[in-house]
Amino acid sequence: MSDTTHPNPLDGRLRLAVAQLNPTVGDISGNAGLVRAARAEAAEQGADLVLYSELVIAGYPPEDLILKRAFIERCMEEVQALARLTADGGPGMLVGSPWLDEGKVYNAVALLDGGKVQTLRFKYDLPNYAVFDEKRVFAAGPLPGPMDFRGIRIGVPICEDIWNDEVCECLSETGAEILLVPNGSPYWENRAEERLQVVVARVVESGLPLVYCNQLGGQDELVFDGGSFALQADRSLAFQMKQFDTELSLSTWVRNEDEIWVCEAAPVATLPDLDEANWLACVQGLRDYVLKNNFPGVVLGLSGGIDSAICAALAVDALGADKVHAIMLPYRYTSRESVRDAADCADALGIRFDHVPIAEPVEGFGRVLGGLFSGCEQDTTEENIQSRARGVILMAISNKFGAMVVTTGNKSEMSVGYATLYGDMNGGFNPIKDLYKTQVYHLSEWRNDHKPAGVLGTDGEVIPSNIITKAPTAELRENQTDQDSLPAYEVLDDILACLVENEMSVADIAKRGHDVALIHRIEHLLYIAEFKRRQAPPGVKITSRNFGKDRRYPITNRFRDRT
């Protein structure tokens, strides 16, 4: 398909709309509807061209849906239908979609204008690391040249294509005047700064302005934060769109006397700080998982502890108080303080709160197993029965009323296996799966002092201060605390971050002041809990290396670092 010159070329001025949308993977017609609505809005604002995010028609990442021929064909049909809209003389569109060409499937961007697909560009650099595995399903395209859009030569590198210099260098050398980049870049801590540094490098090397359009929304464990922006050719910020919000932003670009495209005044949003961004990522991930999978709401066990309290607060911020149902599941070891704290938390959040005591099912299991366990001392077996009884009850409530069970374990617990399969690990989604315990405490305090824009919860203290300040405990036996068998969370989390995020050796971790025997123990717990993590529900990715696609360790593993 060759480039075609538009009969009405632009005369030194480009009104560009950037559409930061929230597509749903596999909802081809729904995603196309979002594209059409954004184009209509852009047309009302006088746009010449609309830039959309990577694979907006399919949703990103589509993973092995790309292996289905019917899926590819439906995406291409929708692109052709969208192309026909442009016969009205309104804005052209740069639309991302999978594309089948000569027996190969590409991650493509189509330029739609004048009633047809004017030309295509295929992604050259396919990422195959961390959460990405595009080489599994896509063929790599050739190095691209610029597209002609109404007399402007635009370069369209696709997402990963700007994370090295090869594609942008090729576009610059072949006459591109401006770089318009569709992206599917997921969130993790400090990701916005990483993107900015990459874009700065490409602008410096190419001498061209660059517009970065990013996807928004939750997709399983990934959250896409938007945050689309543009840099002028001199590396100054041309515009900045919001994070964690759908938005259509119009900017006007003019070709100056030096033949360089310059953005005139355009909106510049203020990005959230790290705490707010982490909170909003958890909210976005939970909200989209619930809504896109058509759950009417959520249910969770509210124990009076910090993890369930923060999950309840996140759920209210994501869905509203009327969509959150909390259950207190007390047993003989549940303290009056915990019952009171859970009730106070539910009251602060304005959510439904019910009591379902678990003595009868727990003791029933004890009677059933009494013969088999005769002569055995009580141990974690009986403790796990308590957790599993709670899990069965929550799942029964979910089955009966349709609400999804929210799982409430943090990354520290999941790292060392302090979670019960078929018990507190039950559920459909875990918003704090990638938050260490110290982060859970920090964000709980932060949320009590801040209410981010766009959340549905209330101002003020939503997590009672007593929950934050008291010693953490699972309350599965008398006078139990987490620190009976684990080091202080500040110590544990630092060791875990060294092992998980940074893959540091025991010797190097010890140089940070940690006891070698303790490091060995934590490493051992980390490895033997792999089988549990394989069975855990998905949860929002926050750190640079979450449990899931980022970290793929064998379950059967005898390696231990004893150097």
Image (cartoon, rainbow, N blue to C red):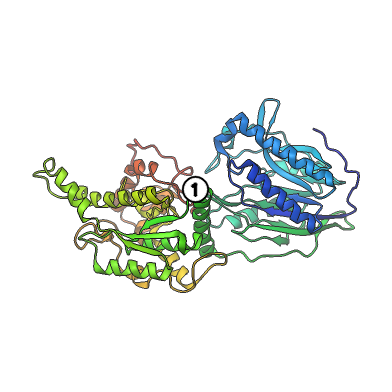
Image coordinates for residue 491, horizontal then vertical, percent: 35, 59
* Side of 277 where 405 appears, left or right: left
Residue holding disc 1: 221
Quick check: 483 above or below 558? below
Residue at the extreme front: 400
User: Which quarter of the figure has residue 440?
Assistant: bottom left
Quadrant of the snapshot with the C terminus: top left
User: Which quarter of the figure has residue 486?
Assistant: bottom left
Image coordinates for residue 365, horizontal then vertical, percent: 19, 47
Q: Is residue 251 visible?
A: yes
| Badge 1 density bin: few <14, some 14–19, many ≥20, Cα 10 Å | many
Q: Is residue 507 visible?
A: no
Residue visible at 34% across and 37% down?
Answer: 557
* Side of 196 where 351 appears, left or right: left
* Side of 194 where 354 appears, left or right: left
Image coordinates for residue 331, horizontal then vertical, percent: 23, 59
Secondary element at image label 1: loop
